[in-house]
Image: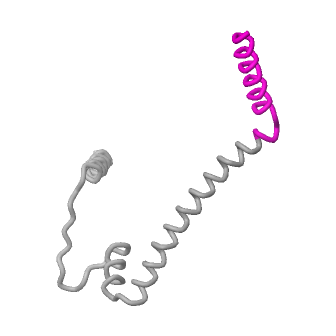
Amino acid sequence: MKKFKIRYRYIALILILLALIFNEGSRTLIRRFFEQKKLASDIQKAQYQNELLKKRIYYLENEPSYIERMVRAELNVIAPGEIEYRFHTKETEQKIKESENKVSAEKR
């Protein structure tokens, strides 16, 4: 008698799982759950980006040294009397060698 009760429980459990899996409403619910998690993550990223931009605006409006750093970094501007030092990486060295090879090939 106990075996039959256990079997009925397993059969009932399997039927419930099948009903949930093949039910359009539950699939939609699961799909919306994952979509909600993705949207929450996107919102969090956008809020973080917004905070960074607000800080940047504040510094641009109130800090002259920040503006100077931005101009130097983005436009490669140096002040009169300053010496600019450039350090070559492997990529820049490779580009220099390639351009030298092209020039020597054109001279031949």
What span is in magenta? 1-27
Where residue 19 sits in the image (x, y, percent)? 80, 30
In this view, 56 is above or below 44: below
Q: Residue furthest front?
A: 1
Residue for point 63% across, 56% down: 39
Where residue 71 sits in the image (x, y, percent)? 36, 79
Where residue 85 sits in the image (x, y, percent)? 19, 68
Residue for point 74% across, 28% down: 17
Q: Is residue 78 visible?
A: yes
**Is residue 29 one of those drawn in magenta?**
no
Q: Is residue 107 visible?
A: no
Q: Residue furthest right?
A: 24
Given residues 91 and 41, the one toward you in this image is: 41
Q: Quadrant of the N terminus?
A: top right
Q: Is residue 99 left or right of residue 23?
A: left
Residue for point 67% across, 50% down: 35
Given residues 4 and 78, the one toward you in this image is: 4
Count how many numbered circles sit on residues in the image.
Answer: 0
Given residues 14 and 100, the one toward you in this image is: 14
In this view, 79 is above or below 11: below
In this view, 63 is above or below 26: below
Q: Quadrant of the C terminus?
A: top left
Report the magenta stretch's main SS.
helix
Residue for point 70% across, 10% down: 3
**Is residue 9 one of those drawn in magenta?**
yes
Q: Is residue 14 left or right of residue 97?
A: right
Coloration mode: one colour
In this view, 79 is above or below 32: below
